[in-house]
Image (cartoon, rainbow, N blue to C red):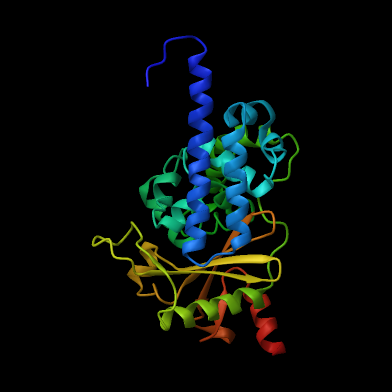
Amino acid sequence: MTESGPAAGPAAATTADNAEIAALLREMADLLEAQGGNPYRARAYRRTADTLASLSESVRTVFDREGLAGLDALPGVGPGIAAAIAEILACGRWGRLERLRGEVDAEALFRTIPGVGPELARQIHDELHVDNLEALEAAALDGRLERLPRLGPRRAAAIRAALTAMLDRRRALRRGARAAVAPGEPPVQALLDVDREYREAAAADRLPKIAPRRFNPEGRAWLPVLHTQRGDWHFTALFSNTARAHELGRTHDWVVIYAEDTEHRERPYTVVTAAGGALAGRRVVRGRESECRGWYAGR
């Protein structure tokens, strides 16, 4: 389409931003339905898509002017979906949608952080099991990043500072809005029960499958995906498709579970079979081993 007047630019930008993001939201809703996800969540994404389609100004303008709080204030948009829109606007990608498409390339994303090269990006993804900048920031803040082999506190601090700088714009625009990280955590028994449900359903071939882009030259749809609910938490579970999981033959042992609260805010967890110690042979949630020990002891 040819633009000929000074008024054409803003109108076209409004149409492009709002229509493109609305299309991504509708695609997420379609994927959730096709994969057996929660219909309430699918409806929430469609409601937001309808809001954007009818918006009289560009959603980018709203974000630039008011930050996450402005997106959250739009009809039918909560903090989690507002954060998803902000991610699309700021990064040109939506990690959650890419995951359900089977297109996640977290290593390429991490290489955009100053000081992170290909080897470290691979190590971060394989060892920390994170696939977006916010999850990596959480790992940097709680000490998991600096515990990576051969990294150390000084280099971890430098990466944390660079990551903070990358996220500063988004953070500043939040204007006091809550961070898009789920408050609290789901109980370990819920995570372990989702892990059990996923592995049993995958073994019985009862789950829809996606074709991951990584480590899948044939483009085969082999990776089962489960959407399930426990109380107020919605869970998405998939086998780990990291280089480390393939290298160790653990692609059908390591399960990555994404826990999403009622506001569509999400945190990742990895469940594995413990190789040694008091929990040897048991399924455990990485980073929450002590809680797993307590839960098994009380059964």
- Residue 59 sits in quarter: top right
Q: Position of residue 78 (x, y in %)?
A: 69, 47
Q: Is residue 122 left or right of residue 42?
A: left
Question: Dividing the image into 4 quarters, which one contains the N terminus?
Answer: top left
Query: Residue 64, can we see it?
Result: yes
Query: Residue 148, can we see it?
Result: no
Callout count:
0
* Residue at the limit of the structure toward the top, as seen here: 5
Q: Position of residue 183 (x, y in %)?
A: 72, 57
Q: Position of residue 157 (x, y in %)?
A: 57, 45
Q: Residue at x 62, y 27 (%)?
A: 56
Q: Residue at x 47, y 40 (%)?
A: 113
Q: Position of residue 75 (x, y in %)?
A: 70, 41
Whether residue 126 is situated above or below residue 249 in the rendered picture:
above
- Which of the two residues, 294 or 222, is positioned nearer the viewer here? 222
- Which of the two residues, 24 or 242, is positioned nearer the viewer here? 24
